């Protein structure tokens, strides 16, 4: 599919109802208003197309960027290209798909994690903490967990909300995965109180770290 054909197809799937839905959640005006499942169906038809993905990303359209994350080839991106992509996006839905489908599978994700963990750019820092949270679960040997807890304790209260979310995920994962650090993780969560009053739908677990940690540990054991 050409870029124009792809954009025309995406536009045909949009609705004002969904555009309004996304606006209320922080998306800008450069969007079509498409349900996420419909974007996945388009991606299933395309499979992978790295050049098309990059052209879609450059449009800055929300759904075009979401689609790009599904059809891109991560290993074809340089670290510099991926860094620019991360820093060019401000809407968290797109940032989270970029993390899930591109960043965590990129060959240089550990190099980028270390760079982004010390970045002043909000979305780069968010991605860095997402990678750190993933490392806690998958390869904690690359981390100094007490030092990570030190940073969370000192930095999370003043961090941007976008960064707080992924820092909090790292805190919860440490408390869940490592009994020897659980007491401290719980204490940090209680003292900082981040997401203590976060609204939660019935049947869902609160993102407040002490509740999150205790609930998952209970389920596991």
Image (cartoon, helix red, strand yellow):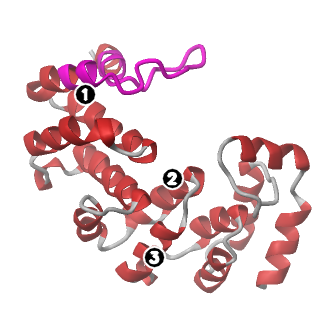
Q: Position of residue 47 (x, y in %)?
A: 65, 71
Residue at left 72%, top 41%?
24
Name the secondary structure under disc 1: helix
Name the secondary structure under disc 3: helix
Location of residue 175 (image quadrant): top left
Report how far apart the C-alphas of labels 2 and 1 lie in the structure.
22 Å
Question: Can the viewer see residue 165?
Answer: yes
N-term-proximal mark, 3 vs 2: 3
Q: Which residue is disc 3 drawn over?
A: 84
Residue at left 17%, top 43%?
151
Q: Which residue is disc 1 drawn over?
A: 176
Q: Which mark is residue 32?
A: none
Residue at left 77%, top 82%?
3
Report how far apart the C-alphas of labels 3 and 1 lie in the structure.
33 Å
Quadrant for the C terminus, please.
Answer: top left
N-term-proximal mark, 3 vs 1: 3
Location of residue 10 (image quadrant): bottom right
Report how far apart the C-alphas of labels 3 and 2 lie in the structure.
15 Å
Q: Which residue is disc 2 drawn over?
A: 96
Relative placement, left or right, of 178 versus 163 is: left
Q: Position of residue 135 (x, y in %)?
A: 25, 50
Relative placement, left or right, of 3 versus 86 is: right
**Which residue range is magenta in the image?**
187-215
Relative placement, left or right, of 147 versus 67 is: left
Residue sitting nearer the eye, 219 or 155: 155
Q: Position of residue 29 (x, y in %)?
A: 77, 59
Location of residue 6 (image quadrant): bottom right
Residue contact between numbered discs 3 and 2, judged by CB atoms under 8 Å: no
Question: Can the viewer see residue 1?
Answer: no
Residue 216 lies, with reference to residue 78, above or below; the image says above
Name the secondary structure under disc 2: helix
Residue at left 81%, top 73%?
7
């Amino acid at each position: 599919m050409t870029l124009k054909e792809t954009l025309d197809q995406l536009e045909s799937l949009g609705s004002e109802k969904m555009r309004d839905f996304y606006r209320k959640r922080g998306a800008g005006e450069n969007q079509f208003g498409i349900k996420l499942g419909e974007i996945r169906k388009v991606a299933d038809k395309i499979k992978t197309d790295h050049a098309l993905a990059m052209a879609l990303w450059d449009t800055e359209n929300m759904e075009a960027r979401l689609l790009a994350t599904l059809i891109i080839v991560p290993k074809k991106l340089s670290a510099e290209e991926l860094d620019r992509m991360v820093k060019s996006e401000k809407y968290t839905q797109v940032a989270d798909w970029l993390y899930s489908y591109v960043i965590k599978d990129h060959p240089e994700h550990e190099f980028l994690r270390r760079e982004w963990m010390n970045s002043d750019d909000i979305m780069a820092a968010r991605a860095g903490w997402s990678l750190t949270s993933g490392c806690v679960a998958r390869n904690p040997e690359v981390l100094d967990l007490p030092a990570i807890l030190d940073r969370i304790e000192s930095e999370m209260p003043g961090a941007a909300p976008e960064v707080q979310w992924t820092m909090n995920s790292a805190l919860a994962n440490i408390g869940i995965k490592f009994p020897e650090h659980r007491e401290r993780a719980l204490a940090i969560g209680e003292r900082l109180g981040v997401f203590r009053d976060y609204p939660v739908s019935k049947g869902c677990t609160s993102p407040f770290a002490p509740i999150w940690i205790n609930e998952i540990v209970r389920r596991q054991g």
